[in-house]
Image: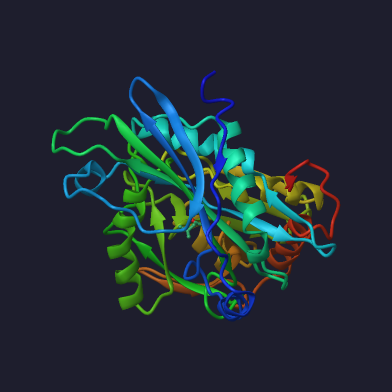
Amino acid sequence: ALTADLHIDRKPTSEPLPAARRAALMADPGFGRVFTDHMVSIRWSAGRGWHSAELVPYQPLSIDPANMTLHYGQAIFEGLKAYRWADGSIATFRPWANARRFQASARRLAMPELPEETFLAAIEALVETDREWVPTREEESLYLRPFMFAMENGLGVRPAAEYLFLLIASPAGAYFSGGVQPVSVWLSKEYVRAAPGGTGAAKFAGNYAASLVAQAQAAEQGCDQVVWLDAKERRWIEEMGGMNLYFVYGGGTDGDPTPTIVTPELSGSLLAGVTRDSLLQVARDLGYRTEERRISVEEWQRGNADGTLTEVFACGTAAVITPVGSVKSAAASWTVGDGTAGDITMRLRRALTDIQTGRAEDTHAWMHRL
Ligand code: COI
């Protein structure tokens, strides 16, 4: 109860960056390179709960060398976007879903759960204050990065008794340079992203650290991205890099000509993407069939060879939808469809971004207007 109505103190703001300098930084923002004028900071202490919630100028932190995060890695994060609509207003996409997933990640890493209302209040405080940083151009948005880590100092291995939640924001263009271009993928049999009982379902910093060597291996193989297989059999497809995957049977399945889109079921070792979940609904709205089930490398290769599996794409908040154009493994390589972005892929992408940017009606109450 104490924290549910935690007030975020909007501290007297520093001088915002002059408009001309902000415009220069936003001319070609890329992804995650430029940050807005402010951040939200909230602390948690054992016995006291959440406290000291404030909006302050974006600034460096001072970290003790014995900070427990630096040693044992209790660190989780989220990612979501605020969009500028044609009328100049601003809306975020499904922030409650991110708030709930942040709590789930916290539970897995033995960290305190930030109340959903406080997560939302932080987003509102930052986006309202730094609203000039929300881009106006198509395909651009303000990427919001909530994160939390241990703030206690010491070398004992146990959950910390102090945590810091921060929210920062970054104007963002395309995640992959080159925009919506098909990527090539390497099927990793040596490395796995996550195992049953592990941290794969949490948005945990260590999952991303553990992925980097496999990503480097994919690059050595001439591929853009790594595709993860399950830890036990190295047979079932899990994710691509940090994104969920979708497989499109453009001519339907089981004698039904309705296109069917298939995504790996939430196995416990893959991330429950908000974009993944949204696309299941958007696909049904467009009249497609959807399936959440296991899909194997053999099924992908076979469906590709017989022409039934026509498109594959990855999805996530940062890059929205990215087509997969070709696949390589130690045993085989193949082109997906004709190697270009598929029609159903691009139709789904457009339908989702239309909702996010206010061009289409928000029939599922996903948008949170500011
Ligand atoms: C995504 O949005 O797809 C992500 O996984 C975030 C990424 C920048 C770590």
Would you identify the image quadrant in which residue 268 lies? top left
Which residue is located at x 63 percent, y 65 percent? 133
Observer-nearest residue: 338 or 43? 43
Give x and y (percent) for residue 303: 57, 61
Q: Residue furthest left?
A: 155
Would you identify the image quadrant in which residue 350 lies? bottom right
**Residue 140 versus residue 54 in the image, above or below:** below
Which residue is located at x 17 percent, y 50 percent? 65
**Residue 231 versus residue 228 in the image, above or below:** above
Give x and y (percent) for residue 20: 62, 80
Look at the image and tell me in which quarter the N terminus lies.
Answer: top right
Give x and y (percent) for residue 331: 34, 68
Which residue is located at x 71 percent, y 61 percent? 250
Q: How is the image coloured?
A: rainbow
Q: Is residue 197 in view from this perspective?
A: no
Q: What is the count of numbered marks?
A: 0
Q: As drawn, is 370 to the left or to the right of 161?
A: right
Q: As drawn, is 194 to the left or to the right of 277?
A: left
Q: Is residue 337 in view from this perspective?
A: yes
Give x and y (percent) for residue 225: 43, 68
Q: As drawn, is 342 to the left or to the right of 230?
A: right
Observer-nearest residue: 368 or 345? 368
Observer-nearest residue: 114 or 318? 114
Observer-nearest residue: 121 or 94? 121
**Residue 66 versus residue 346 in the image, above or below:** above
